[in-house]
Image: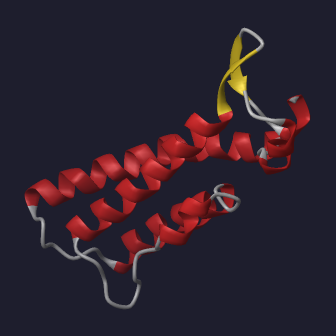
Amino acid sequence: MKSRSDSTNLPTVEIVAKFEMLAPMLESALFEMREFSKKKQDGVLNPLKVKIINRLLVDIKDVLSSDKSTNYLDLLDDELLPQNSDAVLVLGQFKAAMEQFKNKYFGNVNGTYRWRTVENT
């Protein structure tokens, strides 16, 4: 159990809801990019795919904004279009950061598994 001083860094219920909405979208994007990468690792993403993925990644960075991992999370370059394998790498880093966030704030609280948030500590 974290100390009371850590409660200032807890996510809000709103952030948790956004996390839970974005997590499956990230899973889906990562799965699709892995499939593209299997077919053509050095294939270049088109601008629409970069735009769609970056919109997702911007929202995830917002959810993780209080976490130090965001210093290491970069968006896809929309000018120098990335290769499929680059997108897989970036999405994998975001997935790892999301898992780390969940491991930090979701767990056994008084015998019940739930999110630890500002509202329920």
Above or below, comparing residue 110 to residue 105 in the picture: above
Q: How many marks?
A: 0
- Extreme residue in the left direction: 39
Q: x, y (%) of residue 33?
A: 28, 56
* Residue furthest top as drawn: 111
Percent x, y of residue 60 = 59, 58
Extreme residue in the bottom direction: 79
User: Which residue is painted at 80% across and 44% down in the image?
Assistant: 6
Q: Is residue 31 above or below residue 121?
A: below
Q: Residue at x 74, y 33 (%)?
A: 2
Say which quadrant the N terminus sits in. top right
Task: Give 66 or 50, whichever is nearer the viewer.
Answer: 66
Q: Position of residue 12 (x, y in %)?
A: 82, 44
Quadrant in the picture for the C terminus? top right
Is residue 13 shown above or below 69?
A: above
Coloration mode: secondary structure
Side of 119 relative to 15 (left or right):
right
Q: Position of residue 37 (x, y in %)?
A: 17, 59
Q: Nearer the viewer, residue 62 or 47?
A: 62
Q: Residue at x 35, y 54 (%)?
A: 92
Question: Does residue 75 appear to the left or right of 81 in the view shown?
Answer: right
